[in-house]
Amino acid sequence: MAEAKSGDTVRVHYTGTLDDGTVFDSSEGREPLEFTLGTGQVIAGFDHGVTGMQPGDERTVVIPAADAYGEAREELVLQVPRSQFPEGVIPEIGRKLQMSDGQNTFVVTVAEVRDDVVLLDANHDLAGKQLTFRLTLVDIG
């Protein structure tokens, strides 16, 4: 039976959890995730985890932050004066907002609200976190 290798299109069912067991994503109840191995369509650790599997194989992989969404970067936490918030936009911790630097639009999360400034975190929500995936290779296309 063939093993999944770089360049193969694969279909995978998965459940992703954090160290505390919290499920952050899953294909349960949906179609399997389809992607081509080795092309950067998924995080590196997920790609490596599927490589070498055969259809029907199940595997659990633990992916360090460096092979997932990277470490959280302090320079991606922005201090924005409250006076720069548009009228009617109330910053609340955990709220997602869209920002633009003139060329790119990106999502930030309100991390802290102070009297005069709001801290906006532009890191990916899973940055700095080790991820665990339970993988099942459905097929190789």
Image (spheres, helix red, strand yellow):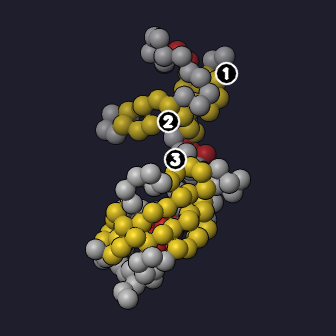
Dot 1 amino acid type:
Arg
Instruction: Please state, as top left, top right, bottom left or bottom right, where the N terminus lies in the image.
Output: bottom left
Residue 24 position, x and y percent, is 56, 49
Residue 84 position, x and y percent, is 48, 18
**Real-space CA distance between mark 2 and mark 1, rounded to the nearest whole angstrom:** 17 Å
> Is 27 positioned to the left or the right of 112 in the image?
left
* Camera-nearest label, 3 or 1: 3
SS under mark 2 = strand
**Residue at 43% in and 72% down:** 137
Instruction: Please state, as top left, top right, bottom left or bottom right, where the C terminus lies in the image.
Output: bottom left
Name the residue tied to disc 2.
Answer: 108
For marks 3 and 2 on the same chain, the one whose residue lies earlier in the sequence: 2
Residue 111 position, x and y percent, is 62, 33
Name the residue tied to disc 1.
Answer: 114
SS under mark 3 = loop
**Real-space CA distance between mark 3 and mark 1, rounded to the nearest whole angstrom:** 22 Å
For marks 2 and 1 on the same chain, the one whose residue lies earlier in the sequence: 2
**Residue at 51% in and 68% down:** 135
Dot 3 amino acid type:
His
Q: 84 above or below 94?
A: above
